[in-house]
Image (tube, rainbow, N blue to C red):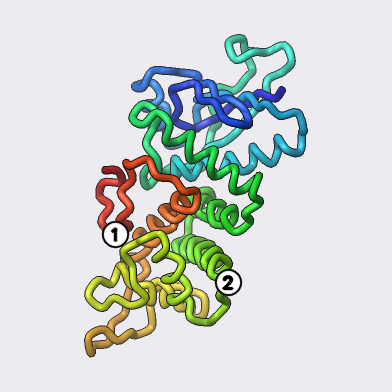
Amino acid sequence: MLTVGIYGFNITKVTHFSFGTMFPTCKSISEIIKKMKSRDELHLTAFLELDINDANECRDILFHLTAILSFIEQRPVSFGYSLRKHESMGNLDDDYPKLINIAYSIKSTGIIIKEDYYSKNSRRYFIEAALNKIIIEKDRHYSTLLHKNVQVFSPPQRYIDVSYYLLFSGLESIARQRENDLSNNAPSVLYKYLSKFKFDIKQQDNKRPPRSLDIYSGLRNALFHNGEYQTAPMKRNGTECTFLLKDYYSYFRRLNSLVILKEANFEDGKINWDFVNYRHYFK
């Protein structure tokens, strides 16, 4: 049985999964909140005890769990050191690291799923569902979508053009696979895919630009083909307009994250599914 430390994940309750159990290192809400506020280090917040003996399977689970937990927090989460044979969670050697120093500032745009002290089972449900899609169902396109979402905030230096391309390519890839559509009309493919999740979005929406897929596709094309951070001129109500990446990036990033939840059939009744009006992430 393998037991490893988890660094930077907000958890206060013992949580059981099909693959093992997470044991928090602190059950005080104020203490975990303080640890999660750190910008340059990840604190030891839990241990994962895996009920799996196969070493390769353990490595796969830890690799994908790192992305799943990071996605939930929208900041890096790390699995660190395994316990030695003579160690236990309550009796660690003096040299067992209680934190990991990070060489860059850790930032989060806001958690995706509420913490367990506000919603007891929400995170557990999503973790189980996401890992099942990746490990059991071997859903490669879902895995790519999730891992690309996490790559946006994982590197020490973040470039908006690289981040946007990662998000767009992940979403476009899964949309084309799900719709079995390789046509050149990306907005049409994305619309068919996203409309099944009942997002308020159109192929072209002249009155509500943030809900217009042709703008997001135009931004991708401008970046990829011309290195430009704005669309080519687009006709809107008889007028030619250009749209800037900096004004639309946050909407698209939020949409990308919500799709990951939808793909896992996650619904706890608390998520604000509007990717444009999301001052409050939760209801």
Q: Amino acid at mark 1?
A: Val
Quadrant for the C terminus, please.
Answer: top left
Q: Secondary structure at mark 1?
A: loop
Given residues 142 and 158, the one toward you in this image is 142
Label 2 crowd bin: few (<14), some (14–19), many (20+), radius 10 Å: few
Give the number of the mark in front: 1 or 2: 2
Say which mark, if any, is on residue 180: 2
Residue 203 in the image, given as x and y percentages of width and height: 37, 76
Judged from this view, the residue extending furthest toward the bottom is 238
Q: Amino acid at mark 2?
A: Asn
Residue at 54 percent of width and 45 percent of height: 130
Residue 119 in the image, given as x and y percentages of width and height: 36, 31
The answer to whether 247 appears left or right of 153 in the picture is left
Residue at 34 percent of width and 60 percent of height: 251
Find disc 1 in the rendering and name its residue: 276
Residue at 25 percent of width and 71 percent of height: 208
Q: Earlier in the sequence, mark 1 or mark 2?
A: 2
